[in-house]
Image (cartoon, grey):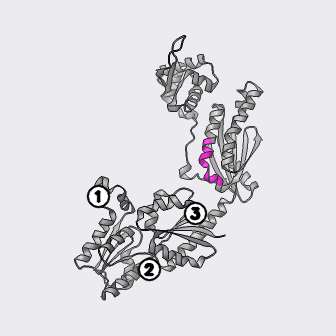
Amino acid sequence: MEYRIGVIGASESVENVRKAGEDYAGELKLLPFPFEKEKEIRNILDENRSLVDGWLFTGPLPYEMGKKYFRKEDHISCCRPAGAMLLVRALEIMRNAGKDKPRFSIDMPEGLIDISEVLSDLNLPLDEVYMKYYRYSELEKYENFQKNGSPRPEETIAAFHRGLYETGKTDGAVTAYRSACLALRERGIPVYFLNLTKTEILLSLRQTVEEIRTTWFKSAQAGTVAIAIHDYENVLDHMNSDAQLQQLEWEIKGKLLPLCEALDGSLVEKGNGRYEIFSSRGQIESHLENLQLAMKEIRMTLNLYGSVAAGIGYGETVTRSRMNARFAVDAPILEEGIRISEDGKEITLPEETQIPPEGEKKDEVGPAARARLKQVGVNEKTLLKIRLAASAFPGGIFSVKDLSTKLSVTPQNIRRIMGALCRAGLAETVSEESAALRGRPGKIYRLL
């Protein structure tokens, strides 16, 4: 299989990677995306994602500059310099200037290369080598330099090199920052761009191939989502008829079918409030937020009479993934949220998808609120049920009729409960409904 890799970097660096990539013909198809200035990276990513299977940045600097624009589905690699090109540039400057010792200035992101250590391999005096280190975050100031009046970062770096060259202290400059390189060239100052050697590029390409192979293998693994409704017997006890129970089951399936469609999977009902969706690892990992949303909607449908949990299992076969999914939801029993298992080992959810469950739990009513509920004679679970129902209304604002319909409780009971919650300081009246032809206008509430 031939993987399409978008190569992002300065034009000469991209060309060097393209040439080195000829050794991987048939395995990699390198698509060049050169930029003149680092601020172009965002548009390159946004406009070309559909064309590539992954991205390769030609160095740590463009990688760091584009980092905040990455998406979780992006496959990103980066070429890491070892310092060989720094030695090449130092020798070039000496030869072109006709000198027997290095006299140049160099800028470098912090932590990338120890300039003194690399240059010491030349066994030449370094008393006329001037170094400037900077943080990656400093280079992002160009986005708001007009607002705070600070100069562009490339201007600051170029000024460092220009001052030394124009006062005769150096014979040239070496920079890892493309924008600074362009600024110095415009001034006619001998400047050398710090890119990578062919050996460094080949090592990076080899690593990229292995990372993509691993990612594709994992994405193609079988995946199962096992959804369990706990306290299902308690849910059944609150159903007044077979028709009501059938309606509940239809509603739950109605929440799961859009998820099943997003996962391009198949839904199987296991009975007693249990369902399984068979898909692939790649699809499941791409739609964890859809799963969170489906669980929230099911929790709303259960009306707090039961809780919902999901176990995700991965494996080389459907049977193995199914076993892992059941292990995730049952061992030990997961009351709420999502757990992922692979071969009996729990996997931590990706940080960006760790969305806390929006359903309320009993321990989310604090001691002070619990004491107030006791004073006005309202059950703690009743408050939790109203909180969950209120979250479905814009701004959490609702009328007696709204809540009565949502909870299938008589308006008289809702008025009594809301009056008690207002006395307890756990709710407030925010307005009144438009006056009706008969009787007093109803109140509009909001929980506190």
Q: Nearer the viewer, mark 1 or mark 2?
A: 1
| Quarter residue 259 falls in | top right
What is the number of the mark on residue 84? Answer: 2
Is 443 placed above or below 391 here?
above
- Residue type at mark 3 is Leu
> Where on the picture, by quarter, is residue 417?
top right
* Image point (55%, 43%), residue name: 356
Determine the CA span between mark 3 and mark 1. 37 Å
Asked whether, in this view, residue 149 is left or right of residue 140, the answer is: left
Residue 207 vs residue 316: left or right?
Answer: left
Of the pair 354 and 213, the residue shown nearer to us: 213
- Cα gap from disc 3 to disc 2, whole angstroms: 33 Å
Identify residue for label 3. Answer: 51
Residue drawn 60% across and 66% down? 212
Image location of residue 244, percent across then percent down: 73, 27
**Magenta region: which residues?**
283-293
85 vs 6: above or below: below
Residue 169 position within the rendered picture, expressed as x and y whole percent measured from the top left: 24, 79
Asked whether 198 falls inside the magenta stretch, the response is no
Considering only order in the chain, which callout, 1 or 3, is on the residue closer to the N terminus? Answer: 3
